[in-house]
Image (cartoon, helix red, strand yellow):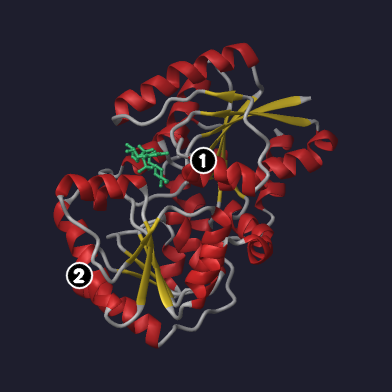
Amino acid sequence: MKRICSIIGARPQFVKAAALSAEIAERGKALGLEEISIHTGQHYDKEMSDIFFEELSIPPPKHRLGIGSGSHGAQTGKMLEAIEKVLMEETPDIVLIYGDTNSTLAGALAAVKLHIPVAHVEAGMRSFNRNMPEEINRVVSDHLASWNLCSTKTAVENLEKEGLAETAALTGDIMFDCALRFAEVAERRRSENAAETAEKGPFVLMTCHRAENTDAPRRISNILDAAAEIAEFRRVVFPAHPRTVGALEKLNISVPEKVELIQPIGYLDTLFLEKRADVILTDSGGMQKEAFFFTTPCVTMRDETEWVETVEMGVNILAGASKEKIATATLDFAEHPPAFSDASPYGDGNAAAKILETLNEG
Ligand code: UD1
């Protein structure tokens, strides 16, 4: 029996783990694989962590490290030390990491130093912007991993250019599995608040949490000005990440009155609202893909994206942090939604199965 130790810690990782852990629970025995998981505690508020375990029935992590927030060095360093301790006790055969957060990087480093091979889910993504902490986390994690499990052909090509072809496997995107698995559940189990929000009339669903936006006063104020402008014509519903709330408090900027500011929402409510929104306005990576899965047009408040396929297909516009571009693109998409082709650059929704088969082949 091969033992896989999954490292999770931040919101998007809980979602991805929901699909893969379920697959391991269903098929692991037959394949000779079993899972234990470590929650680093990077995200710890109920609505940033526990809600995902409850609503997606994710098995409780065996180890909770409770690391919490901090500067990049402090947070990653504390995780590294604590993960190493658990890995020395558990001696797993494979350490599995997801995405590009500080938990991803700490998991990869702790494992390779103990000579435990690393499997990286959502590997090979590149923004080519090294100012993003996530880009550093991705590049380093990919170079440490023995299996780079890629969502897209672009990701495989990125790895080939970095001499990592031998480690790359195209599995499709695990978030597509999640969206397919949970979209129907979301219809039944969305909260009353989400249902009311959707019923009130057409809306734009906005999220903003990237450090490159929240920590740059000019960018965040342009983004809020754009939201105010959009809100003159279309409702803007804005579940705010705690990083964003904290940054706005520090800058003494408030969210424009017409924008409907709400608490962070769980995955099921997110899917429910994404499906019904006229436009998704975001700087999240996951939401750009989910917009595509639900044929909702997307405006991305970044200067570049790893999910280039959505832009090439004309259903996602990169608007940076320009007030004019954000407002114009969002209102245009709301009035004239683009046509979605039936191309499927993110696979067939069976990434979890392909990941397990790849790991099983060794
Ligand atoms: C992290 C990831 C980012 C991912 C995002 C998903 C890194 C470098 N970034 O960013 O790639 O898209 O998660 O949400 O790993 N906070 C709370 N409660 C919480 C968690 C955070 O209040 O439960 C606040 C704290 O003030 C903290 C800040 O949010 O300092 C930032 O949290 P952190 O985990 O460092 O980064 P994220 O912005 O969440």
Name the residue carrying label 1. Answer: 49
Q: Are marks 2 and 1 in contact (CB under 8 Å)?
A: no
Q: Amino acid at mark 2?
A: Lys
Q: Could you give the CA–CA distance between mark 2 and mark 1, rounded to whole angstroms? A: 32 Å
Task: Please tell me which residue is depicted at 23% across the width and 64% down the height of the picture.
Answer: 224
Q: Nearer the viewer, residue 253 or 322?
A: 253
Is residue 345 visible in this depiction of the protein? Answer: no
Q: Quadrant for ligand 1?
A: top left
Which x, y percent locates residue 137?
Answer: 39, 37
Dividing the picture into quarters, in which one does residue 97 lie?
Answer: top right
Front in this rendered view, residue 317 or 282: 282
Tell me the amino acid under the disc marked 1.
Ser
- Comparing 140 with 202, the one in front is 202
| Above or below, comparing residue 158 to residue 191 in the picture | above
Which image quarter: residue 279?
Answer: bottom left
Q: Look at the numbered disc 2 and say if its residue's Cβ is closer than 8 Å to ligand 1.
A: no
x%, y% of residue 276? 52, 74
Residue found at x 73% / y 36%: 361
Q: Residue at x 44, y 27 (%)?
A: 106
Ligand 1 within 8 Å, label 1 CB: yes
- Tell me residue 96's x, y (percent): 59, 33
* Residue receiving disc 2: 323
Q: Is residue 259 left or right of residue 349?
A: left
Q: Find numbered disc 2 in the image and state the secondary structure of the residue it sits on.
A: helix
Q: Quick one: label 1, few (<14), some, or many (20+) residues within 10 Å?
A: many
Task: Relative to 183, say whether 84 is above or below.
Answer: above
Query: What percent of the width, then of the height, locates residue 226?
Result: 23, 70
Relative to the observer, which residue lies in front, 266 or 31? Answer: 266
Q: Going 34% across and 38% down the picture, which residue do you hit?
A: 136
What label sits on residue 29 in the rendered view? none
